[in-house]
Amino acid sequence: MRLAADSAAMQGRRPKQEDKHVKIPDLTKAARALKMPIDHLEQPCAFFAVYDGHQGHLCAEFVAKTFHVKLLKRLSADKSADSWTDARISSMLTEIFEELDAEFLAKYRTALDGCVVVTALLIGTRLFVAWVGHARCLVGRAGPQSGISELALTEDHRPSVEAEAERVRQAGGVIVDYGFGYARVAHQGYDERLRELRRAQALGLGNIGKEPVALDVSRALGDREFKAGKPLLIPTPGVKRLQLDSSHKFVSLLCSGIPNWMTDEEIVNELDMVREADATSDVRAACGSLVQEAYNRGSDSNLSAIMLRLQWPGESQSTYVRKVASVEKAKAAAAAALAAAMGADGKASAAAASKRRRLETAASINAQKVAAYEKAVSTSDAALHNAAEEARKEAEIAVMKAEVEATKVEVAKREREEAATAKRAEAARAEGAKDAAEEPVGLDAAEAFFAARKAKRAAAGDAPKAAAPAAGPGAEGQQEPVGLDAAEAFF
């Protein structure tokens, strides 16, 4: 058996994308890369999961990063293939769900968001599906009449299910019933608090407090507000095992935003149509078409879908024949046009028949254009994506090189400036030392000064004043030089 897997996701009408999904078509190869080999298990091994977040994306991201790692640690710990019975694998999946919930609540103590989960583990021809909440797993199965039928492997964990509602009530919660099978889980006093807020708004007081939360699932990971004390929501998953055979054509994992707007039968039929010749491209186009169809029908949620097509040996000789998407669209358009053209008696007039033929032709041409466009997009998306990625990498490398070169130039300029400054300082020091060595100091400097003074006076013809002759020892009126004259007389 060979596998062809791909996925599609859309943020849709939500302000943020809170969904995450993981697809590992070759789990054995991934296990070797992570140094946790699982070659002892029956092949092929694959793992797929959709993590549908609500009230935030933190829980979905945390679980998406750690679920498959915990799975591989357990599968690689025991090398005996016989020991991995159905009961043991089911128990292991349950342990992982509950362990991840406890770890998230312990690590992110202020996070209030949560997520519902659906996982599919394929070991040989054994398919194990584990889920909490209303994410869904559907299997497309070929019937005896060469058609395709749906097989649901999950059962929604909703408060509208009586067993789930009873468990919530016993835990102290309430079920807010909106009718038509739609209900939510809430804490005691939910209705009273909601009426109080609405009354305040009606009186013009604005928002006087936070609006209470009510969830439309009875099991989920995270959701701290619903797990204080006796938990209203539990992380214990439902687990089912399916033995695959050649009648099973594909497996699909879906977030809640798709089955809320489409029936299981519609989903399976949409996924089963032929869109591309290449198996992987066909799966990718099918997921994209399903997500788009749910959006077109008015889904207001994030949208995520994973599809795993099972390619059995000798399938080409099977009586199972898939429908072509473009042909089915043309038929649907023609049928709608015919219904509109028919009169009250169910018969078409000549004008109506002519109009019907024109509409059929236009619908056929439009279907061909759509098919050609989808094929062109699906075949060129990968090349365009790769080219854009390469261009982005080259641009980043060019920017990094430019930054490095600019840094080098700046460093060289700074080094030159520092060298020039050092050279000027050294020259100044050398000049100062030279001047200091050439100029006299002390008495020599004084003698040089007065010699220059005498030379200046001599050049000006001004002789120094002579001292008057002394009249004898102790004679009065004797004049002695003072100031510079005295100093000059000394030298």
Image (tube, rainbow, N blue to C red):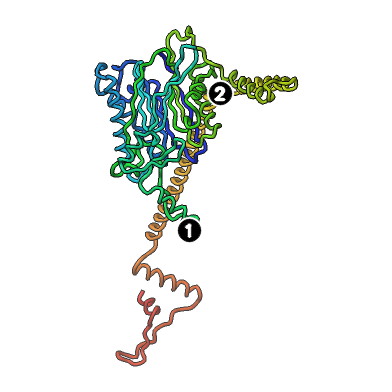
The answer to whether the residues at label 2 and label 1 have Cβ atoms under 8 Å apart is: no
Quadrant of the image occupied by residue 80? top left
Q: Position of residue 27 (x, y in %)?
A: 36, 22
Q: Position of residue 278 (x, y in %)?
A: 51, 16
Residue at 39% x, 57% y: name it: 434
Q: Which residue is mark 2?
A: 380
Please name the amino acid that badge 1 sits on: Leu
Residue placed farthest to the front in the image? 345
Q: Nearer the viewer, residue 401 or 348?
A: 348
Please name the amino acid that badge 2 sits on: Ser
Q: State the CA–CA distance, disc 2 to disc 1.
A: 56 Å
Residue placed farthest to the right in the image? 351
Q: Residues within 10 Å of mark 1 (few under 14, many from 20)?
A: few
Q: Is residue 360 visible?
A: yes
Mark closer to the chain start, 2 or 1: 1
Residue at 54% x, 23% y: name it: 378
Q: Is residue 60 visible?
A: no
Q: Is residue 89 left or right of residue 369?
A: left
Q: Position of residue 442 (x, y in %)?
A: 34, 68
Q: Position of residue 257 (x, y in %)?
A: 47, 33
Residue 205 circle label: 1
**Considering only vertical position in the picture, is 434 above or below 450?**
above
Quadrant of the image occupied by residue 326? top right
